[in-house]
Amino acid sequence: MNLNIGVIKGDGIGPEIVTEAMKVLDRTAKIYGHTCDYTQLLLGGASIDVHGVPLTDETIAGAKKCDAVLMGSIGGDAKTSPWYQLEPSKRPEAGLLAIRKALNLFANLRPAILYDELKGACPLKEEITEGGFDLMIMRELTGGLYFGERKTVTEDGVLTAYDSLTYNENEIRRIAKRAFDIAMKRGKKVTSVDKANVLDSSRLWRKVVEEVAIDYPEVSLTHMLVDNCAMQLVKNPKQFDVVLTENMFGDILSDEASMVTGSIGMLASASLNETKFGLYEPSGGSAPDIAGKGIANPIATILSAAMMLRFSFDLDKEADAIESAVAKVLKEGYRTIDIMSEGKTQVGTAEMGDLIASHLA
Ligand code: IPM
Ligand code: MG
C-alpha cells in the first residue's frame, strides 16, 4: 500500500520528533511491504517565517490531498519569539486552530496509558496506579470557547473582553457518537464531563449525550462535573475508560491525564473528521526551551504515527508493531530525560527513534 502522508514538522522540538516518527514509519513500511510518500507542509511559526501568516491556503489544499497528516508541534516562546509580536490572529496557535476548523477535525482522541515500565515517572502513589490505567479522552475540537465570538471592547471606559462558549446539538451529537463508538471497542464506559451546574452549553451537552446513549445500550454512561473530574483523575484514574468532553475542558484535562502517565512526552493524539482523514500529533507543545538539544522525547509522535496507521490506513498489525516496539524499548530500560529514573539508561531523541525502529521486528 502507498501511504500518502502530509508532514508538518512545525516549530521548537517539532522537526526533531517528527524526524524520528518518520524513521519508525519508514522502517515499518519496509517490513510490511508499504511505501510512504511524504509531502512537507508549513504551519505555525515556520509558516510565518516564510509567508507571514501561520496557515496558507496552500497548506490546507496540500493537507486535503493527503490521506493523513503527521504533525510535530507549533509555537514558540511567547516572551522572546517575534511571532508573538503579531496580533493574536496571526500567531502560530491561530494557524493550528484554523487548520483544525478547515479540515473539520472535530474529534480529538487523546489516549493516556500508564506503562508498567514508567510507573517510576508517575507522580501518583503506587496504591493508586497499581495495575496501570488506560483511558481515552475524546475532546471536541472545533467548537466551544475556542471558536465562539471573541472581542475586546471598552464599555463605559472599562476594557472588557468577551469569549463565547457556543455548542449546537449537532456538534454535540457527532462527537458523542464517536465517543460511544470508541467505547464499544474498549471498556464500554463513557464519562461525559461538563459543568451542567452552571453552564447552559453543558446542560444541552448532557441532554444530547443522553439521547445518543439510548442507541448504545451496552455502554454505561456517567456524567461528571469538570472540577470533580480534575480531582478524580489524580484520585482514581482507573475508573475511566472514555472521557467525553468539550474543547476547553478537554484541553485542560488531557494535559492533566498526560502528567499522571508520567510525561506529556508520551501522549499521542488523533484529530479526525467524518472521513478516514486525520491529523496526528503529540499532545505536548513545542517545548522551545529544549529545541535543538536532541533531548526531546519522540515517543508521543511515534505513537501518533501508530494511531495514523490504525485510524487512517486500517493498518492495525503495523500499528501494533510500533506500539509494542515502544513498550519493548521502555522495558529494556531506555529513557529520554523527561521520563528518566534511577538505574535506567538515558538516551537522546535520535537514539530513542533508532531503538524503536530496530525493535520493530
Ligand atoms: C493542544 C494545545 C492547543 C490547544 C494550543 C496550542 C492552541 O494546547 O493541542 O492541546 O489549546 O488546543
Ligand atoms: Mg493543550
Image (cartoon, grey):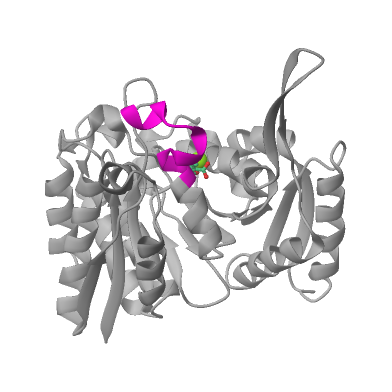
**Rendered position, 248 above or below 328:** above
**Rendered position, 177 above or below 315:** above
Q: In the rendered image, is residue 264 in sight?
A: yes
- Between 359 and 96, the residue placed more toward the observer is 96
Left/right placement of residue 126 relative to residue 179 reads left
- Between 229 and 203, the residue placed more toward the observer is 203
How far from the left and from the top, in percent, is residue 345?
15, 38
Residue under the image location 81 percent in, 62 percent down:
169
Main structural element of the magenta stretch: helix, strand or loop? helix
Q: Residue 216 lies in what quarter of the image?
A: bottom right
**Magenta residues (range):** 82-94
**Rendered position, 94 above or below 136:** above
Residue under the image location 48 percent in, 34 percent down:
126
How far from the left and from the top, in percent, is residue 263?
39, 38
The number of callouts visible is 0
Q: Residue 212 lies in what quarter of the image?
A: bottom right
Residue under the image location 73 percent in, 68 percent down:
219
Q: Does the magenta stretch include residue 91?
A: yes
The quarter of the image holding the N terminus is bottom left
Left/right placement of residue 274 relative to residue 227 reads left
How far from the left and from the top, in percent, is residue 130?
50, 42
Residue under the image location 59 percent in, 34 percent down:
234
Q: In the rendered image, is residue 132 in sight?
A: no
Q: Residue 205 lies in what quarter of the image?
A: bottom right
The quarter of the image holding the C terminus is bottom left
